[in-house]
């Protein structure tokens, strides 16, 4: 067996061990261990992606060499490797982009704990991507929940504690529904490995038995993951969680945490239930409806905001709506568009949160739009980065957001039943995106007279500026070289099936 087949397991275990080791270290040492871990995991994920592309199929790694039903399995294909690589890159850039603010936002004695939580969070994300076992997936869903909650409340002010409690309540509700659905499905199939569950589900449907319990279990798992990923109207916890946590936490939470749950739902659709069976349950019609509603109401809420970080947070509600709209189309094209948008949104939303902190730093720490006037001139790197992120969210050509909306439009045209509502809402949402993002860009580039606010240059924060530049390059690469990524997504979905 080629040694590269061990890389997915090694990636997950490295994160877990790094979290344990960092718990007994000082903050700076924990930070460098975290950076080394992320770099190594990025390289391992890249090697795994190249290997699966050359292999042309997925492979299964049996944990401890114990076969099912006693053992556990990791499954890696093109889609899993691509997602793992992207998650590692985004987390690495997000942590370095907000590192200069961490000392201000977190007590010195708790900085090491911050990196422990990020290590555990990355381990859970990689496990959700790679695992071939539903019970293991549920365990790491809970690890993900606890880690994310810790990242929210580690700042320890009134708003973050309230946001963390609200997040925990909603997230535990989602976890409970997921567990109930999983227990029912296990009772019906007698298996926990995804491949075995899919075979049993197909047999149940073919026999016409236990149809209602099967549908109930699918609904429970779907609703649970929708709550955890903040699909409208289950998004009440999101604005405060993203808006008042540390800048790195906001970037990670918005870009990665919800995407881990969404990717698990994709695996359930393809590898547990089966795409055709899931389609026939008509649950996708409900996902389609709530996705459209999220696109509109999330954008309307963003327009009403006078706080730049809460505005970006409400924008995430709309973007998650895009992803579920693609699911709801019930076609392969819609699923490809949704998965590409997961990558596009992760790259863009992290960029916006990291850039926003640079704008507020040169505006007296205020996040109100009136105080941000002219901040694009006082922090040129942050201003350019925020503009790029805004143009991407609106869907301007050259940036990744344009490709997302193009793919959604093409997918909508292929579904004659849902084409009209999808295109109409897509157009309305784009206009609303332009209203609140372009309003902000105009604000930060509105000239002002003399001001007491400081000016930040590249020399003041070279790492911060380098991170913004990396995010801009990543966004443009997804915008102008999207076809190889789309091809990998299509190849990965074919392996899923």
Image (tube, rainbow, N blue to C red):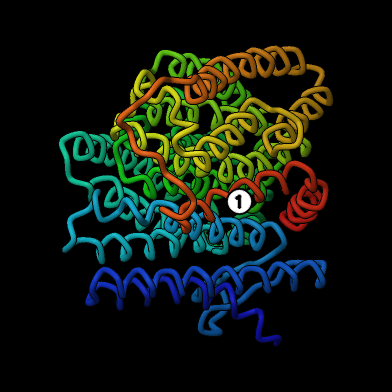
| Residue at screen point 53% across, 75% down | 40
Q: Is residue 102 above or below residue 17?
A: above
Q: Position of residue 182 (x, y in %)?
A: 45, 49
The answer, for residue 373, to whether it is visible in the render is yes
The answer, for residue 213, to whether it is visible in the render is no
Q: Is residue 335 above or below residue 35?
A: above
Q: Position of residue 407 (x, y in %)?
A: 77, 33
Q: Nearer the viewer, residue 90 or 439?
A: 439
Q: Is 408 left, or right, of 437 in this rendering? A: right
> Would you name the residue on which mark 1 appears?
267
Tell me the element at label 1: helix
| Residue at screen point 61% across, 62% down | 85
Q: Is 407 left, or right, of 207 in this rendering? A: right
Q: Quadrant of the N terminus?
A: bottom right
Q: Is residue 255 above or below residue 290?
A: below
Q: Nearer the viewer, residue 28 or 122?
A: 28
Q: Position of residue 38 (x, y in %)?
A: 49, 68
Name the quadrant containing residue 165: top left
Q: Position of residue 327 (x, y in %)?
A: 65, 34
| Residue at screen point 70% across, 44% down | 476
Q: Nearer the viewer, residue 309 or 48?
A: 309
Name the quadrant containing residue 296: top right
């Amino acid at each position: 067996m080629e040694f590269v087949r061990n890389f997915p397991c090694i990636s997950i275990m490295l994160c877990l061990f790094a979290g344990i080791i960092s718990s007994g270290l000082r903050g700076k040492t924990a930070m460098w261990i975290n950076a080394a871990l992320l770099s190594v995991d990025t390289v391992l994920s890249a090697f795994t992606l190249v290997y699966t592309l050359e292999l042309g199929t997925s492979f299964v790694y049996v944990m401890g060499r114990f076969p099912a039903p006693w053992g556990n399995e990791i499954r890696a294909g093109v889609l899993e490797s691509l997602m793992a690589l992207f998650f590692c890159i985004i987390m690495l850039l997000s942590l370095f982009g907000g590192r200069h603010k961490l000392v201000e936002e977190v007590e010195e004695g708790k900085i090491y704990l911050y990196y422990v939580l990020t290590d555990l969070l990355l381990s859970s994300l990689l496990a959700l991507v790679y695992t071939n076992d539903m019970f293991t997936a549920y365990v790491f869903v809970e690890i993900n929940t606890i880690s994310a909650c810790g990242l929210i409340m580690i700042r320890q002010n009134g708003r973050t504690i309230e946001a963390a409690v609200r997040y925990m309540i909603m997230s535990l509700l989602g976890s409970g529904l997921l567990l109930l659905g999983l227990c029912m499905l296990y009772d019906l199939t007698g298996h926990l490995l995804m491949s075995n569950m899919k075979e049993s589900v197909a047999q149940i449907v073919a026999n016409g038995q236990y149809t209602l319990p099967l549908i109930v279990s699918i609904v429970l798992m779907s609703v649970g993951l929708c709550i955890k990923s903040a699909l409208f109207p289950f998004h009440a916890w999101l604005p405060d969680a993203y808006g008042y946590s540390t800048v790195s936490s906001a970037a990670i939470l918005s870009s990665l945490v919800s995407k881990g749950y969404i990717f698990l739902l994709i695996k359930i659709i393809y590898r547990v239930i089966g795409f055709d069976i899931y389609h026939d349950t008509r649950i996708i019609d409900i996902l389609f409806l709530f996705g459209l509603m999220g696109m509109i109401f999330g954008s309307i809420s963003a327009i009403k905001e006078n706080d730049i970080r809460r505005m970006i947070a409400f924008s995430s509600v709309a973007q998650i709506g895009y992803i579920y709209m693609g699911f709801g189309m019930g076609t392969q094209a819609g699923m490809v568009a949704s998965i590409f948008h997961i990558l596009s949104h992760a790259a863009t939303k992290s960029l916006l949160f990291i850039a926003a902190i640079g704008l507020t730093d040169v505006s007296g720490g205020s996040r109100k739009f009136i105080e941000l006037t002219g901040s694009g001139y006082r922090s040129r790197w942050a201003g350019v980065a925020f503009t790029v992120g805004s143009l991407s969210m609106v869907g301007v050509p050259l940036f990744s957001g344009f490709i997302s909306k193009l793919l959604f439009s093409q997918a909508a045209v292929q579904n004659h039943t849902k084409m009209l509502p999808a295109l109409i809402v897509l157009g309305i949402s784009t206009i609303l995106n332009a209203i609140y993002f372009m309003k902000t860009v105009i604000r930060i580039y509105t000239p002002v007279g003399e001001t007491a606010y400081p000016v930040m240059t590249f020399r003041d924060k070279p790492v911060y500026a380098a991170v913004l530049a990396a995010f801009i390059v990543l966004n443009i690469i997804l915008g102008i070289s999207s076809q190889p990524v789309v091809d990998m997504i299509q190849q990965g979905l074919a392996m899923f099936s």
